[in-house]
Amino acid sequence: MVDTRSTLENDKGDAENLIYRIVVVGDPQVGKTSLIRRACQNRFEAEAIGTSLHKDNVLVGLVAEVPVTLDIFESTDYRRTPPQILFADTLAVVMVYDVTSPVSFFGLYRWKQEVQRIRSNMPLVVVGNKNDLPSIVPMSEAQGWATFEGIRFMSVSAATGEGVAEIFRQAGQLAHEHHDLLNHQWSLSR
């Protein structure tokens, strides 16, 4: 089994930081890069960026009293980056839609299928971005779908920063729990 958790050690050999890989996915123009930029650099730029694969990292705080850093990968197009590569060693996936775009909300189903085709037990978080704008997708519908699917749901705004840090704290917690589950399953299979 590939160890999906990295530990940095200081001069004394003590563990300083856990590093978990998460992936942020969603249709184009939903604000994935803006969410990551807000979390990592606390800034927002209104222009569309349009990336196909991007990597950044952010310290999200403590999980089990150990600092956790997320290696955040972003993808818009699962056809350009094969899912087996995109989701390799990934411990949680954040699926983003734009609350002003029903098409992007309906795209979440496709993203969920793509993720679960690779790893059926992958922890997921659904994020409705741009909650600072008038919503066309009713939050109750999005939250209802996420609850039905057993997925955490959050409504956020990359523009104002509302809820953004919490996305990545929750993703870090899910990644930590998933890592522990995978290690437990691996130790039982030995």
Image (cartoon, rainbow, N blue to C red):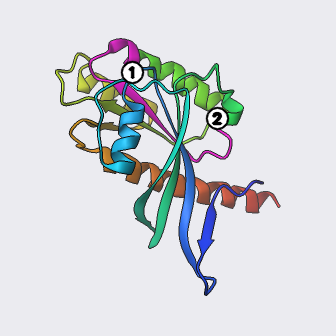
The question of residue 92 being in magenta is answered with yes
Three-letter amino acid code of the residue under disc 1: Gln
Residue at (64, 21) in percent of width and height: 80
Q: Is residue 39 toward the left or the right of residue 137 in the image? A: right
Which quadrant would the C terminus be assigned to in this image? bottom right
The question of residue 36 being in magenta is answered with no
Asked if 82 appears above or below 67 in the picture, the reply is above
Q: Which of disc 1 and disc 2 is earlier in sequence?
A: 1
**Residue 29: assigned label:** 1
Residue 132 image-quadrant placement: top left
Range of residues picked out in magenta? 86-105
Dot 2 crowding, Cα within 10 Å, few <14, some 14–19, many 20+: some
Residue 67 is situated, as x and y percent measured from the top left of the image, at: 46, 68
**Residue 86: assigned label:** 2
- Front-most of residues 93 and 37: 37
- Front-most of residues 171 and 185: 171
